[in-house]
Structures are given as C-alpha cells and as structure tokens.
C-alpha cells in the first residue's frame, strides 16, 4: 500500500454497494421539510418523527457509508445532499456529523467543510490492543449476564451463521460479523463499554474494508463467532473471553500480512 508521506490513506478506488455495517436505526417514512419536520400525508399534516430518531437514522446511514468506504477516506460530505437523500433536514444530519466527528470517522475543517476522516494504518495496533482486552471482557460479561430475550437473539444469530455456510457474499458476511460483535457488547450489560467498543469496531471495520479484497479466509473468520456464541449461551465466560480475544488478534495479524 502506498501512502502520502505516511501511512494515511487519502482515498480508495473501491466502490461497494449499499451495505449495513451494523444495525440501522429505524426512521420515519414520508418526505420531510428542510427543517427536519414532517411532510403532508393525503392532504393532511403528517406527524414529524422525533428529532432523536432522525438523528439516529442519519448517524447509522452516514456511519455505514464511511465504514464500508462508499464514502472514501478524505471525501467531502455534503450535508444538504445527504439530507435530501435521507429525506430529512439539516439539524439531524449535523447532529449525526457531530457524533461521527467524536468517533474519528468525520473531520470538520472550519470554513472548508466536512470530510470522511483519513485512515491511518499505524492506528491498527492501538485499536487492536484495546479491542483484545475489552472485547474479551465483554464476552466474559455477556456469558454471565445474558438475558432470556437476548438468548433468543443469540439463537437467531447462530442460525444466520449456519445458513451462511459456504457463502461468498462478502457484504452479507461483513454485516453479520458486525451484528455479532454489537450483540455481544449489548449482552455485557455495560453501556460505557458498549459505546467504547462500538467506536473501536467502526474504526477496525474501516481498515478491514480497505484491504478486504486481499484478505483470505473471510468466511472462516466470521464463523469463529459460532464458538464464542455457544460459549456465551453455555455460560462459559472464560472460554467466551479467550475465543473472542484470539479472534481479534487473528484479525490484526491477517491485515498486517497483506499490508
């Protein structure tokens, strides 16, 4: 990989189809005015969705576009265009951009505009160092704290993993991988750890997408989650911790091997 004066990546020639890197927040339906309010439905006045829901939807959509490199590193982000595409006003879009800036996915330059942050490959070691420790601990806590409702969700994820066996649908496998990680974060029952790990997962996924075409064994890598989910279901906290920590370490080694 070449870089401009360092390990920073200014852009990518890869363009990927629409893909969810994680769960998308639910948002309301009809066309909305530029102030983020509701439109009209059947001649009557529509009810505007709560601003928080619009901001969450804008956050999820913009996050996924950046993480999957549909918006390449260093590319400008047009708030007005994004608002039109999502059928919402500027306020929720700007709130989403503020969140993404705090997560190092967006960079805002005064009087210049908003851009997808560059990717610095040297950050991989720092990101993985945090994830190995915290994700292992999250899996440990998940095995201790998983609820009955979450067990039902775990069963559905295991079914998805089973149904995807032999799949070459890269986007679907990547989306499934992210859903499993975020599920484990929720099961850990610690909102601070969940928020921290979600941020580092997004940064990791972005690096992963950058080298995805050169990474071997994607299917096997994603299906390592079968073991950690079974360990969580069985209440085997130590096994869940060890499997997920090794999963993260393998991720870093495979990426470094193709850089």
Image (cartoon, rainbow, N blue to C red):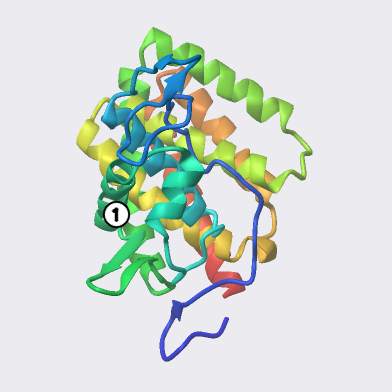
Left of 230 or right of it: where is 121? Answer: left
* Position above or below: 93 against 87: below
* Position above or below: 72 against 3: above
Please tell me in which quadrant of the rendered image residue 103 appears.
bottom left
Task: Identify which residue is drawn at 77% across, 39% down.
Answer: 167
Q: Position of residue 85 (x, y in %)?
A: 51, 45
Task: Identify which residue is drawn at 49% across, 17% down.
Answer: 153
Furthest-front residue in view? 43
Task: Identify which residue is drawn at 55% across, 35% down.
Answer: 225
Q: Which residue is mark 1?
A: 103
Furthest-bottom residue in view? 5
The quarter of the rendered structure image containing the C terminus is bottom right
Q: At numbered mark 1, what does the secondary structure look like: helix, strand or loop?
A: loop
Tally of numbered tags: 1
Left of 45 or right of it: where is 17? Answer: right
For the residue pair 243 and 218, the one nearer the viewer reads as 218
For the residue pair 19 and 177, the one nearer the viewer reads as 19
For the residue pair 46 and 61, the one nearer the viewer reads as 46
Left of 205 or right of it: where is 187? Answer: left
The quarter of the rendered structure image containing the N terminus is bottom right
Task: Identify which residue is drawn at 64% across, 26% down.
Answer: 160
Q: Is residue 245 visible?
A: yes
Characterize the local packing of mark 1: few (<14), some (14-19) or many (20 or more) Cα atoms within 10 angstroms: some
For the residue pair 249 and 6, the one nearer the viewer reads as 6
Q: Position of residue 168 (x, y in %)?
A: 77, 45
Q: Is residue 249 visible?
A: no
Q: Position of residue 34 (x, y in %)?
A: 35, 41
Q: Position of residue 29 (x, y in %)?
A: 48, 25
* Position above or below: 59 against 29: below
Left of 68 or right of it: where is 124? Answer: left
């Amino acid at each position: 990989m070449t870089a401009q004066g360092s390990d920073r990546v200014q852009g990518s020639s890869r363009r990927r189809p629409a893909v969810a890197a994680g769960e998308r927040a639910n948002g309301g339906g009809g066309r909305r005015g530029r102030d983020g309010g509701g439109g009209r439905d059947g001649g009557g006045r529509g009810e505007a969705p709560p601003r928080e829901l619009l901001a969450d939807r804008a956050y999820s959509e913009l996050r996924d576009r950046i993480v999957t490199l549909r918006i390449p590193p260093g590319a400008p982000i047009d708030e007005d265009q994004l608002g039109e595409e999502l059928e919402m006003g500027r306020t929720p879009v700007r709130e989403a951009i503020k969140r993404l800036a705090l997560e190092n996915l967006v960079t805002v330059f005064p009087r210049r505009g908003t851009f997808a942050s560059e990717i610095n490959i040297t950050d991989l070691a720092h990101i993985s160092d945090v994830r190995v420790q915290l994700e292992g601990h999250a899996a440990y806590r998940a095995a201790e704290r998983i609820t009955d409702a979450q067990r039902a969700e775990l069963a559905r994820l295991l079914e998805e993993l089973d149904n995807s066996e032999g799949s070459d649908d890269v986007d679907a496998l990547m989306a499934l991988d992210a859903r499993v990680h975020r599920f484990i974060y929720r099961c850990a029952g610690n909102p601070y750890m969940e928020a921290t790990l979600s941020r580092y997962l997004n940064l990791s996924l972005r690096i992963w997408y950058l080298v995805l075409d050169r990474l071997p064994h994607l299917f096997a890598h994603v299906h390592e989650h079968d073991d950690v989910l079974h360990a969580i279901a069985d209440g085997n906290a130590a096994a869940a911790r060890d499997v997920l920590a090794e999963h993260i370490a393998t991720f870093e080694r495979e990426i470094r091997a193709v850089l």
